[in-house]
Amino acid sequence: MDEERRTLPYECRRCWHVWQEDYVVRHFADAHGNEVDIWLRGGVQVPPPASGVMICPKCGCQQATTFPDGYLARHPELIPPPRPAEPDATPLLSPVRKRMYKG
Ligand SMILES: [Zn+2]
């Protein structure tokens, strides 16, 4: 048995909430040699994401869509930060550079 961890990004078509779900995919071969994938989320078997049934954790609607693999890796700004950003401790510096006068 082959097991693979997958993290799939979702986007709600109603409220545009973006989130990710962690899955474990188990690959089996059936008696005919066909590959069968079992999708688990939190140890519970769930329908494959391709079936398109995913409930938005924010608004509860069922119109979530998946991104292509690797989409969020190219758009990290879509992933909500896990906690509020800490205030920037860097002191504000004027962007205007001091003029250098030459004798
Ligand atoms: Zn939603």
Image: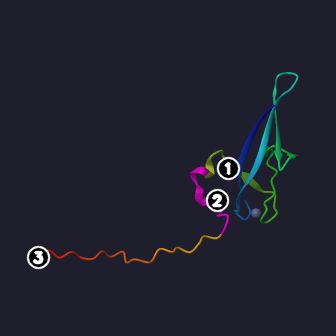
Upstream in the sequence, badge 1 or badge 3?
1
Q: Looking at the image, do the residues carrying marks 1 and 2 touch, with CB atoms under 8 Å apart?
A: no
Q: How dense is the environment of label 3, judged by Cα within 10 Å: few (below 14), some, or many (20 and up)?
A: few
Residue at 67% over, 49% down: 67
Tell me where the magenta segment starts and ends, as one range: 73-83
Q: Amino acid at mark 3?
A: Gly
Please state which of the two labelled residues, at mark 1 or mark 2, is closer to the viewer: 2
Q: Position of residue 42 (x, y in %)?
A: 83, 50
Tell which quarter ligand 1 is in. bottom right
Viewer-proximal residue among 3 and 17: 3
In the displayed orientation, state which residue is furthest to the left. Answer: 103
Mark 3 — residue?
Answer: 103
Q: What separation in Å lies between label 1 and label 2 (alpha carbons)? A: 12 Å
Mark 2 — residue?
Answer: 79
Quadrant containing the N terminus in the rendered view? top right
Please state which of the two labelled residues, at mark 1 or mark 3, is closer to the viewer: 3
The type of colouring in the image is: rainbow
Viewer-proximal residue among 43 and 17: 43
Q: Looking at the image, do the residues carrying marks 1 and 3 touch, with CB atoms under 8 Å apart?
A: no
Q: Is residue 4 left or right of residue 30?
A: left
Q: Which mark is residue 67?
A: 1
Q: What separation in Å lies between label 1 and label 3 (alpha carbons)? A: 61 Å
Identify the image quadrant of residue 17: bottom right
Q: What separation in Å lies between label 2 and label 3 (alpha carbons)? A: 53 Å
Viewer-proximal residue among 60 and 92: 92
Q: Is residue 86 left or right of residue 95?
A: right
Q: Amino acid at mark 1?
A: Phe
Q: Amino acid at mark 2?
A: Ile
Ligand 1 has an atom within 8 Å of the beta carbon of the residue at disc 3? no
Report if residue 63 lies within the magenta region.
no
- Is residue 4 positioned above or below 17 on the image? above
